[in-house]
Amino acid sequence: MSTEEELPPSKLGTKEYWDKVYEREVGVFEDTGDEGEVWFGERAMQKMRDWVYANCEPEQEQRSGEAITKRRIRVMECGCGNATLLLSLLTPPTNNEYGDQDAEDESQTSAAKPRFLPTQLTGIDYSEASIKLAQGVAERRRDMWKRRVERAKKAARGDDEPTHDEASESSEDEEDDYDSEDEEALSPATLQLDDPLLTQLPLFLAGDLLTFRSIRDLYASLPGSSPHKTRQDINEPWDLVLDKGTFDALALSQETIPIPRVKQDGSEVTEQRLPSAVYPEKVAQLVRKGGFFLITSCNFTEQEIKSRFGKPELGFEFHSRVSHPSFSFGGQTGSSVCTVAFRKL
């Protein structure tokens, strides 16, 4: 299809559908601890995580007059779902390979990098049930990691055998659905109980990415007493913005969005626009100059993603791609998903 041809409408493009999905997954999580589906699979998620470790420095220099300070970068995930992608950033790759990008991505390196500890992980989703699930998953993982650290510290001191409760908790951890290779990177010997991984949870926001007018608007779902509402960076864009399947879902909606626009004479008019047209513009507002936007899609090809997000007015330039397993059919070669990175000019 042409780069601007719209996808046929589907129930997957409606908020009602995703509310039902996440309400069901919240119930399952509360009953069994199952964190829910990882869209596009664990490997696609790990490849995005690996790209981040290969291309994003844990700290960014910030200049104020003659002084230069360093700050940890800020990360936003659009349409965070159960937050498994966002949380994966806290666990570095367990080897020195950061994906298998092709030669066009010259920034890839096999050098080991330190654990990625952004100053704030932020996830946003228009489904409140999704936010509830994400908060539950984040809290559960933090508690699990903390128990493992506490047990390891106790064992290192030569303390007695674990109590019945501690043994039960250890058994629960071993049976946990989240017990992947990532855990190797979180050796209790490398963590302290005051580690940010154990003390700081991501910030989750219930909000609509298609209708905000300023970044401050995204914090509207937080209670008035929330300390995040007085953050110094509340109006600042993010260093890294992630999308895994969110643009795909929005592109399946034909429900237009009223978007106000100021005309040259200063008057304001309202235009009705499709989510697929509005979303790239909103994402561009979220990424700071020099920052990255990393997107994985199954409904669009790499060229279509470049066409949608590479328009000059958005301020993005193509940076690199992440390769995925390919298949051949009818003389054509392709893959089921594509991952593309853009840098904000």
Image (cartoon, grey):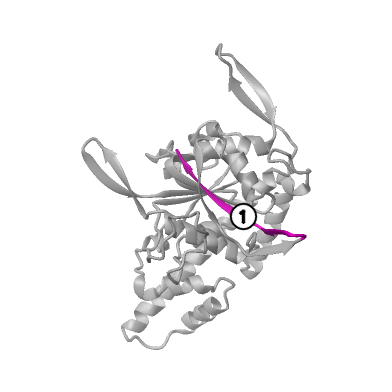
Q: Is residue 12 magenta?
A: no
Q: Is residue 96 left or right of residue 264?
A: left
Q: Is residue 279 left or right of residue 90?
A: right
Chain part drawn in magenta: 330-345
Badge 1 amino acid:
Cys
Q: Can you say which quadrant of the picture contains the C terminus?
A: top left
* Camera-side residue of 95 and 201: 95
Q: Residue furthest front?
A: 331
Q: Can you say which quadrant of the picture contains the N terminus?
A: top right
Q: Is residue 333 left or right of residue 138?
A: right
Q: Is residue 299 left or right of residue 123?
A: right
The reply to whether residue 318 is in sight is: yes
* Camera-side residue of 170 and 1: 1
Identify the main secondary structure in magenta.
strand
Residue at x 67%, y 24% (from the top left corner): 271
Residue at x 75%, y 38% (from the top left corner): 254
Q: Disc 1 marks which residue?
A: 338
Residue at x 51%, y 73% (from the top left corner): 181
Residue 260 placed where, x, y %?
A: 61, 24
Residue 69 placed where, x, y %?
A: 26, 46
